[in-house]
Image (spheres, rainbow, N blue to C red):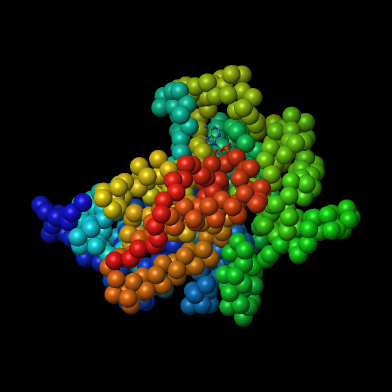
Amino acid sequence: MGSIEVTGPEATHVEELDALVIGGGFSGVYQLKKLREEGYKVKLVEAGSGYGGIWYWNRYPGARVDSHAPHYQFSDPNLWKNWHWKQRYPDHNELRAYFEFVGEKWDLKKDTYFETYVTSATWDEKQYKWIIKTKDGRTFKSKFFLPHTGIAASRSFPDWKGIGTFKGLMVHSSYWPHEQPDLKGKKIAVVGTGSTGVQLSQTVADIAGELVVFQRTPALPLHMRQVNYGPGEQPKPQSALGDFFQTCFKGRWGFDFDFVPKQTFEDNEAQRRAVYETLWEAGDFTYWLGSYTDMLLSEEANNEAYKFWREKTRARINDPRVKELLAPEKPPYPFGSKRVPLEVSYIDMFNRPNVHLVDVNETPVVEVTEGGIRTTEKLWDFDVIILATGFDAVTGGLTTIDIRGIDGQSLKTKFDKRGPTTYCGITVAGFPNMFFSSGPQAPTAFCNGPTCSELQGDWIANTMNHIRDAKLSSIVADEKSENEWIDHVEAVASMTLVPKGRSVSDLSPFLSYDWRKQEGGVSVS
Ligand code: NAP
């Protein structure tokens, strides 16, 4: 493919850049700041009208982050010395306020185009530039294309018959109206039991007339110990935060804690229970990501952790049927092999007479009608149906843009054919000077967001600096390197129980298809 000529009315609007960043979430805003500091001419485009990424869109009742403070923030002292968290688990309002604050402190707005949606990005082989077009008619010509579109840019909807016929309010969790709909006393369905479904259901249960949760796979959530911080109170003293962030950067999951430094059965039963109790009482991810070293490696060890979780959870449920659906006798998948949600009252709410649990495996959905959802068991009437059915996770944000690399190859077609293939989870063979964060074959769903955003953003900036210093035009991974990376990720993943989790969203970093083996190396030009 030759050089792309930008002609017609668009030609007058071409903006020449060193780098174009897509996405105003943690990764995008960090990338903009970092590259500006490194002397690049860079702009950020964002579909929403504010910063926050997923937190700009996630406005559903109960939306809050599951990474406990002070983890979920940038490591820049200029920020944390001037910011006060109100909650150990900040909600979406507090997170948007934090992003506003970051935008001001880092002076980001002058280099940001809000309400701008990128439709295509095409590599021009003659100019060694990306030609990037937006829905509103802008054209950018940029040496680097950095789509930090995140794991949740493209929504998933059930393919139920009649889904368009419902006459009440049907809303996807991530398109929550900015003006809160009145849910008081309403008959409400929540479909999906991932982190979103859990948070939504437990919040809506307090106001709904009737709530029905449609479950396909049980969530196996952990209890969230929320704390409200008054003036002068914070999760850690400021003097400790510098070291704290350095520990997170080196940490296994982007957190400051690590595994209990021994295997499950090195302790006797009483010692084990004491360890589990301590982890449980923390009310955060430590029962999942800070457990014994073999918890995610050995089924026997994993079962032991599951047994304790099941005992704690079942003790909160009255109805034996609900006990078996929420906390089955036999683990539905290895505990922690899917992203573990945190909950406050999700388990207990099923004891209320107006809260019901429908297992769509037992009684599948037949159709959506004007007034509700018909399962094989009955017709449920609803005023509101909330779809907490997740996203075309990890790759959806990339593949909804028409991205074309060398020889006009389409990224979507490549991913459709081979599965999501990357080199280091950060670039794709055949797509020069294109880098992203939170991609497939990267830590993504298993990493504390801001920590990985900074690490990956620094890696990208360092690579760009190398290209600049070496006076190169472009750098591109090839399929041999890509295959080696995928083999490596799969080898590591297959040593763990993670591939036995059944969630598409959480497995996608490890999905494998028919990897073609080809010769080659990383080439620069
Ligand atoms: P998700 O994890 O993909 O969960 C989607 C849920 O919908 C799953 O329970 C799925 O069941 C269910 N589902 C999908 N289609 C269905 C159907 N046709 N019928 C019944 N159930 C159906 O999505 P999410 O909860 O929105 O989370 C997305 C990402 O954002 C995750 O990585 C999550 O960790 C993150 N997130 C984080 C926070 C936080 O930090 N607090 C909050 C919200 C979300 P299966 O499991 O059977 O597929």
Q: Nearer the viewer, residue 406 or 347?
A: 406
Q: Percent from the top left, x then y, of residue 443?
A: 54, 57
**Residue 20 horizontal side relative to residue 231, left or right:** left
Q: Residue at x 66, y 47 (%)?
A: 497
Q: Is residue 107 in sight in this rendering? A: no
The image quadrant that residue 192 belongs to is: top right
Counting the numbered discs, the total is 0
The quadrant of the picture showing ligand 1 is: top right
Q: Is residue 414 above or below residue 466?
A: above
Q: Is residue 178 above or below residue 370?
A: below
The image quadrant that residue 270 belongs to is: bottom right
Q: Residue at x 43, y 43 (%)?
A: 418
The image quadrant that residue 155 belongs to is: top left
Q: Nearer the viewer, residue 448 or 511?
A: 511
Q: Percent from the top left, x then y, of residue 286?
A: 69, 59
Q: Percent from the top left, x then y, of residue 32?
A: 37, 68
Q: Residue at x 50, y 33 (%)?
A: 385
Q: Is residue 157 above or below residue 148?
A: above
Q: Nearer the viewer, residue 292 or 244?
A: 292
Q: Is residue 273 in sight in this rendering? A: yes
**Residue 224 horizontal side relative to residue 56, left or right:** right
Residue at the far front in the pictured view: 519
Q: Residue at x 33, y 55 (%)?
A: 431
**Residue 525 horizontal side relative to residue 445, left or right:** left
Residue at the far bottom in the pictured view: 239
Which quarter of the figure is the C terminus placed in? Answer: bottom left
Q: Percent from the top left, x then y, of residue 434?
A: 35, 59
